[in-house]
Image (cartoon, helix red, strand yellow):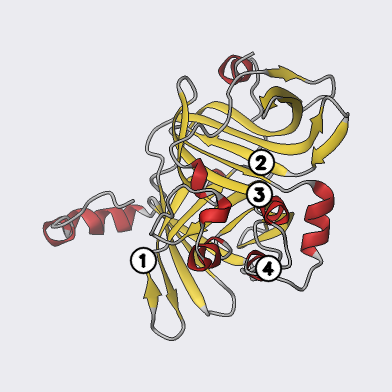
Amino acid sequence: MKLLELVKDINKKDKKGVPNWMLGTFKRRSISFYNGLSDNTTDVFWIQSRNFTIDLRLPKEIIEKKELAAYTKENLSEIANYEGWVADSIFDGEKLFWEGGIFYQNRNKWPEPAFMKKIGNCMLEFCPSNVYVEDWRLQNSKNDYLIGLRVVQEIDLETNESRRSDGGLIICGEFAAICLGREKSLEDRFSSMNYTLEDILLNKEYSLDEKKEYLNFETSIAKGSLEKGYKIFASTNPNRYDEELTKLDGFQLENKEGEVSQLFEENGKKFKRIYEIDIIDSDFNFETKTDTTEEAKSWFKKESRTLNRYLDYLK
């Protein structure tokens, strides 16, 4: 069954989790630090489901598609410092915390929670230490599908062994994101290592096959539609650009309430991926506007001659 057909029969709009104004696909316009310096060049995407986040941070320059053995030392160093992850999101009414999950790196580079404030389509993230503030812009602009599926398990149907035990797929209208972890035992081993991914990729003591295993982690962002599919435009894997994000068929409801599964083939082998449904809403209102007071609206109208001079929807 196609995912589009499946979601038409399911509505799971549970309000438990982050508020509606925080849901959707956000792109960072800038980050400003305590020392007066700012960055508005790094490509950073934040895709938010009701109870989990997918995050991707990449340099502007895209490394061309190559076999791993063909990458230069500089290429490997750059790839080793990409960032991508999925984690549980917990909002206490003021601050957003992230717990658990899996990371492309073997350490959490952003340990502080975030004070969140949204005005219009602009969401501001302040960290408690005031070391930085980030300006995020909602990319969604109309009502559309919002689907959040958290990976519970991925099974090799030939061996019946579990390959992955975490990850996620979020679809927000014309945008979609996926995060898939490494094989579980490797993920556990990597997370407890003192070596970084860069140490591994630049170390000649690791074989090419071993390096490929450590790089077998994907966070990708794509654009398209639930009807026609999604094509990747940003990824931790340079060879995934312009490819299909994920198959959108082979889905079915599981016997266990709140779970769906997907059957698919990869390199000639058959797999079953089981997802827990976080949210499914076929007509979600992505909030591009926020409330204010009547007095403030009157002020805005009164001063429109100058306030409206250069207004535009920034993304």
Q: Sequence-wise, which precedes: disc 2 or disc 1?
A: 1
Residue under the point 31% across and 58% down: 296
Image quarter (top left, top right, bottom left or bottom right) of the N terminus: top right
Between the residue at mark 2 and the residue at mark 1, the CA separation in whole angstroms equals 27 Å
Would you name the residue on which mark 2 appears? 168
- Where residue 260 appears, as percent x and y from the top left, is 73, 25
Identify the residue position indicated by label 4 in the image: 204
Q: Residue 216, position in %: x, y?
A: 67, 48
Q: Is residue 236 above or below residue 232?
A: below
Q: Is residue 18 visible?
A: no
From the viewer's perspective, is 94 left or right of 150?
Answer: left
Q: CA distance from mark 3 to mark 1?
A: 26 Å
Residues at discs 2 and 3 in contact (Cβ within 8 Å): no
> Along the line of sight, which residue is nearer the eye, 112 or 123?
112
What amino acid is found at the position of numbered circle 4 in the picture?
A: Lys
Gap between marks 2 and 3 measured at Cα:
12 Å
Amino acid of disc 3: Phe
Q: Amino acid at mark 2?
A: Gly
Viewer-nearest residue: 236 or 269: 269
As drawn, the label of residue 217 is 3
Q: What is the crowding at mark 1: few (fewer than 14 residues within 10 Å), some, or many (at least 20)?
A: few
Which of disc 3 and disc 4 is earlier in sequence?
4
Query: Residue 133 placed where, x, y %?
Result: 47, 71
**Residue 40 image label:** 1
**Residue at x 59%, y 66% (from the top left corner):** 114
Tell me if 17 is positioned left or right of 135 in this view. Answer: right
Tell me the SS state at disc 3.
Answer: loop
Residue at 38% in and 51% down:
120
